[in-house]
Image: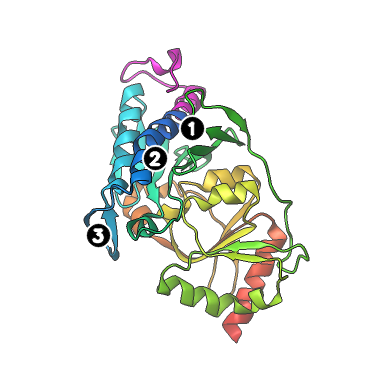
Amino acid sequence: MVSGNELERSPGEQLSPREVRNLTRNIFLNYASVANQALHPMVEAGQGRSSLGSVPGREHDEQLQIDAMGEPILANLIRDVHLPAFVFGEHNYHDYSDGNPKVVFTIDPFDNSGEFARGLDTPPYSVLGAYNPDGSPIGAVVVDIKGQKAFVSIRKVNRVIDLSTIEMRHQELEVVRPKKNSVKDKDGIVIASYVGEREYSRKYYSAFGLMEDDWSEKSRHYGNGGAFVYAYLATGAVDAYVMFDEPHSEILPGLPLALAAGCVTSSVDLENGEAQEYKFDPEFIIDPERYNDGTVPLFIAARSLELRDEIIGYYLRGRKD
């Protein structure tokens, strides 16, 4: 656990922007440590798969017992340091600021829960992001629960932390592959898109079959995605993430990692292919249901602008065909 004088403050004490960033940074590190300690043993033992009921508005999704653990951990960390914060959970929201938040947290407490519930060996993650009330990103942490490590973005610097030891060793995040500007790159690319459910797989393959026909035999389609995938974009393991009807609650927790790595994130008009920069909308704080219930018709996060534009071109071609 991170400690220090900067954590010792009284309720109502005014905070400078620097103090908010420092408190948020410490919450990232402490969340990674506490979440790993709580969730790793459960995942290893296959515990926490019992259902707490269906998710309101998403009846095909169930909330698992293990899903419900991350948000209380975050709430306790916020209360411990008296940080005025607004928290968007995956399906709910909480105001710990009396209407005047200094930081906005976005959390997906247990990503890949559907695969975990079915006993599949898909790595689960816990993802926490933070933004200033004006929408600018502060940072994010993606906790690899099985691997006991965390990908952390603080002050636009991405690092990886070893959570398996008490020292929590830090090192700069290594980029494993250079940026690619075309799906036809001879060395291959990796496109991620979640296709684990029929509603997503049908749309993806219908729109982007032509793109996959054109790419190198060295290319790969990574058929998973969600809040954790931004760590893979940051490392370069994934070149682009493409999703239809992607919920804001799946994008915003991990997004700062990709932004710090220089990725381009866009919402795309389904009719004309026009791309607009995607970012946290401060209006979510006023109308939280837009965050919890809203989706992006076509979302693309890519490691280069050229690659994003080429993917949009394939979408428009597939739409005509």
Q: Residue at x 43, y 54 (%)?
A: 250
Numbered range of the magenta stretch: 1-26
Query: 34 or 239, which lies in front?
Result: 34
Residue drawn at (41%, 18%) of the image:
7
Q: Quadrant of the C terminus?
A: bottom right
Residue sitting at x 62%, y 31%: 171
Q: Residue furthest right?
A: 186
Precedes in sequence: disc 3 or disc 1: 3
On the image, numbered disc 1 is attached to which residue? 163
Residue 20 magenta-drawn? yes
Residue 139 is at least partly visible in this image: no
In this picture, residue 33 sits left or right of residue 268: left
Instruction: Give the image location of residue 168, x and y in percent.
Output: 51, 27
- Pick whichever of labels 2 and 3 is earlier in the sequence: 2
Residue at the spot of label 2: 40
Q: Position of residue 207 (x, y in %)?
A: 56, 77
Q: Is residue 89 above or below residue 3?
A: below
Mark closer to the chain start, 1 or 2? 2
Q: Secondary structure at mark 1?
A: loop
Work out which residue is located at the far top of the displayed protein and give it: 5
Question: x, y (%) of residue 133?
Answer: 44, 38
Give the percent coordinates (x, y) of residue 52: 21, 53
In the drawing, what numbered circle is on residue 56? 3
Question: Residues at badges 1 and 2 in contact (C-beta under 8 Å)?
Answer: yes
Going by the image, does 79 lie left or right of 304?
Answer: left
Label for residue 90?
none
The image quadrant that residue 117 belongs to is bottom left
Query: Disc 3 versus disc 1: distance between alpha carbons?
Result: 34 Å
